[in-house]
Image: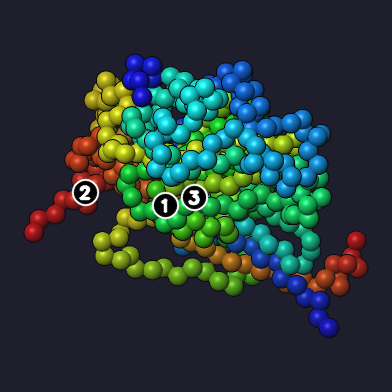
Amino acid sequence: MSNIRQNVLVLYLESSALDSRTIAWSIYEGASNARHDAGDSDEPPYTTGLAALRDGWRLFQASPLQQHSAGDEFRVGYLKYEFLFEKLIDTDQTERTP
Amino acid sequence: MNMQASQRLSTLQMAEFAARGCLRLDAVVPESLNQRFLADVGHVPDQNVDSLWNHYGKIMRSSAIPLVNPGTPMDAAYPHDSAVAELLRLPVVRGAIESLLGRAPVVDHHFLHITFPGRLYAAAGQPHVAQHTHQDSTIDPRRAFDVQIMYYPHDVTRDMGGTRFVPGTHLRVVSEAAIARYQNVRGQQHMVCKAGTLLFLHHGIWHGGGRNDSERLRYMFKIRLCPTERQTRLWDTQDLEEKSEPRPIFWNPAPGNQQTIESILMNPEPWFEADTGRLEYINRIQLWRYLTGDEKWDADYWMTRVENEYV
């Protein structure tokens, strides 16, 4: 049976460009019991999305660009440039490796 | 409320609140009043608390915090001689309330938040975690705004997990816990303060309670207040005209250090997106128009440019 587990990194960037600056971030680890809490760090793990790619994170979803509805052009809401990355971890290997 | 006993906010303080959605008054509540508040709510020495359910239950049943129906005038919500009523009568507190909400605000609700040390969550079989990031209440597209007063009756150290909030998020229209996925945001602040500190927050500010990693209980009393009038020119407006100073935009190598309404409203937050940061400026300008009643006011030409229409 496979012991592959997924770690997820969510980066919110300054624009739709992957090499733009990280403004918000979240981490969820399925491959360990490590817990990442709201407010647990004031500096991002990667300064850009590109830096995460170069560290082995695989991009699996990016928020699309959407047309602004007429009459609602100036409304702001959710963070706009969300990128979800994953790392697949073989927990058998991590348990054997000190 | 008695106007003579209030210290209204200045124009620049109001501009700061319009831009960032927060106003902090450090250690303005006297220590004797802090102690009275803690005694009123039923605080006991931390080592005597062995169950978070029992402690919360006891406080909710027996504390002096009154049951208040939503819509009750603030001045009628608390017994005259109670610590909360006295706190709300402090000139600096009353001045801030009157400046933001007018003379006759009503209470939406209040709540005593208690954040316990890890040992008590473990004993209760509850996770010892920070509260997710959220915006209170529900989707709220109004220009008028409510104010949430957070009162910290004792010193709050960093390890006690004081309220986390993100300045400048108040004009974002989102739906409560829909933003729970945002664990960390550049520019987020964690309340670390002296006893008797008050934090005034626009109702739209993104926030959450931090995880208490200390051995002490952390108390925070929140009152949400609503205006009963248009929130226009309620502060000390003597210097309103002189604090507004149009300036060249983009091609301006030395913008100067003097604080003006424009410099405050056009100051970005660390989390601003490249494009929607400009929409934040537009929304701040629109809020300032509401606050001043001047529907033509502009900063750095953001509104004038998009209103320059000929049909």
Q: Which residue is mark 1?
A: B172
Tell me the SS state at disc 3.
Answer: loop
Q: In the image, B42: left or right of B111? A: right
- Disc 3 crowd rating (10 Å Cα; few below 14, some 14-19, many 20+) is some
Q: Check chain identity for marks 1 and 2: say if they share one.
A: yes
Q: Which mark is residue B136?
A: 3
Confirm whether residue B118 shows in the render: no
Place of residue B20 in the rendered image (x, y in percent of width and height, measured from the top left): 43, 39
Q: In the image, A26: left or right of A91? A: left
Residue A64 occupies quadrant: bottom left
Residue A85 occupies quadrant: bottom right
What chain letter is assigned to the residue under label 1?
A: B
Separation of marks 3 and 1 at Cα, in angstroms: 12 Å
Name the foreground residue: B97 vs B48: B48
The image quadrant where one finds the C terminus of chain B is bottom left
Three-letter amino acid code at disc 3? Asp
- Of badges 2 and 3, nearer the viewer stands 3
Three-letter amino acid code at disc 1? Arg
- Please give the name of the residue rendered at 54% of the width and 46% of the height, measured from the top-left corner: B207
The image quadrant where one finds the N terminus of chain B is top left
Q: Which mark is residue B147?
A: none
Q: Check chain identity for marks 3 and 1: say if they share one.
A: yes
Three-letter amino acid code at disc 2? Arg
Name the foreground residue: B191 vs B146: B146
- Please give the name of the residue rendered at 20% of the width and 37% of the height, measured from the top-left corner: B294
- Disc 1 crowd rating (10 Å Cα; few below 14, some 14-19, many 20+) is many
- Of badges 3 and 1, nearer the viewer stands 3
Place of residue B153 in the rendered image (x, y in percent of width and height, measured from the top left): 61, 28
- Please give the name of the residue rendered at 55% of the width and 22% of the height, measured from the top-left corner: B29
Separation of marks 2 and 3 at Cα, in angstroms: 34 Å
Q: Which residue is mark 2?
A: B305
Place of residue B39 in the rendered image (x, y in percent of width and height, measured from the top left): 66, 27
